[in-house]
Amino acid sequence: MEKGSFIERFKCLIIQPARFLYESRQRIIFLNEKRLSVGVSPITSSLERIKNSLFLADTYFGFEIPHPVPPLYQEIGPVMQESYPPLTPKLSSFLSLHQRIMYVSFGMQAFTTLENYAILLKSFLEVIDRNIIDGIVWSLSGLENFPTLSDDTQLETSEILNNRYTHIYVTTSSSLEELTPQVSILNHSNTKIFLTHGGVASCHESLYVGKPMLILPLASDQFSNAEKLEEQGVALKLDKMDLHVDDIVRKIEFLQLESRVKINLKRMQILTKINSKRKYRAADLIEFVMKASQLNPNNNDVKESVVDNRHMKEGKESSEKVSNETNSESIEPAIEDIYEWLLKEWITPDSRMGFIRGKYLDVYGVVLILLFSIIGSIIWTGWSVVSFIVNSIASLFEGKLKSD
């Protein structure tokens, strides 16, 4: 929102959080009713469930807008696979026969209107006709209810969907077993542009191989992803409510020819590849939590170890007595919140100090009082001095007038 208007920033700071709180409150009420019905204690806030929890985020600096985050929030993305499915022979042949390919995919769960699909199809034919792009690979989740072109376009839609048109290759991904090898397509040297819905995984994959994106956001975080990547200079976004053929054609041409886009992409590709190694850190963090949980003082094995050590040291009291003392005095009272103990290296002290002490509001308050006191004293002293001087001068004039 760095360049947003006052209204946009007001919505971002006030309206959207208020809407989120209201909607989440309704969900909490509904879930609490379900919890009570099965004998589970209700919660008062959605944040209560994740308090003192380690949060691993599949994102990274460069992709996100810079902002401070708490220690328990660890960025470990982009999480990329070690290997990806290779190109099929037909796809490989199509990619090799075309020099400037645009790959189109909106995922398996994102859909737009038939009118928008028709506009996109017209745009594809236009960029091919103008030789801006000479090939398009279009991954569809299914061929049902696909629009037909009812204008003067010579090409039949059925010819495109059945791959009888030499410049457009259509693949279908109706299940996880039939997924189009997206990364392999994007990584091909002849693929120049990626038209996507802006899903975070697709964005990461495109940046990893250094391909510019034309983003048509359809739902959820896709809108913010489009804005962030457009701000980074590696993508342009479309409006699903206001699609136009000329606008799509112009943006495809810009992304392919603009030198600044290539420079920005190279920078983002470096950032993405460097940060992709952090998935191993994520595994290390998970391993630490798993092993540390076994050292929980409320764990029976740990209790027995503590009991045995104390018994050997004292040599007089029975293990049963020491065990009871250990359980009642040493271990259990010290651990009020096992998750707080488990992740104590990441939990900041201010979370235990309360809002006023944690934010140093009491200290700032005293400083302000002292400053106001000093300023007030200076003003009072100055006023007193000026008043004394004025009164003295006035007395002198009065005495002089009386003597005259």
Image: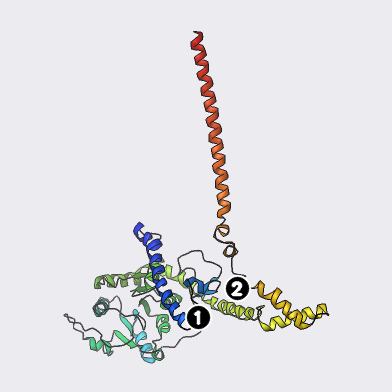
Q: Position of residue 218 (x, y in %)?
A: 33, 75
Callouts 1 and 2 close, C-beta under 8 Å: no
Q: Position of 167 compared to 278: left or right?
A: left
Q: Earlier in the sequence, mark 1 or mark 2?
A: 1
Q: Residue shown at 30%/77% (left/top)?
A: 133
Q: Position of 327 compared to 358: left or right?
A: right
How many badges with numbers are in the image? Answer: 2
Say what secondary structure mark 2 lies in: loop
Q: Is residue 76 visible?
A: no
Q: Which mark, residue 249?
A: none
Of residues 344 and 326, the one drawn nearer to the viewer in this rendering: 326
Q: Can residue 214 be seen in this view?
A: yes
Q: Mark 1 points at which residue?
A: 40
Q: Position of residue 400 (x, y in %)?
A: 51, 12
Amino acid type at circle 1 is Val
Q: Position of 188 compared to 169: left or right?
A: right
Q: Name the residue under label 2.
A: 337
Q: Position of 141 compared to 378: left or right?
A: left
Q: Where is residue 14 in the image (x, y as percent from the top left)?
A: 39, 61
Q: Is residue 384 above or below residue 341?
A: above
Of residues 374 and 57, the one drawn nearer to the viewer in this rendering: 374
Say what secondary structure mark 1 lies in: loop
Pointer 2 local density, CA inside 10 Å: few below 14, some 14–19, many at least 20 = few
Amino acid type at circle 2 is Asp
Pointer 1 local density, CA inside 10 Å: few below 14, some 14–19, many at least 20 = few
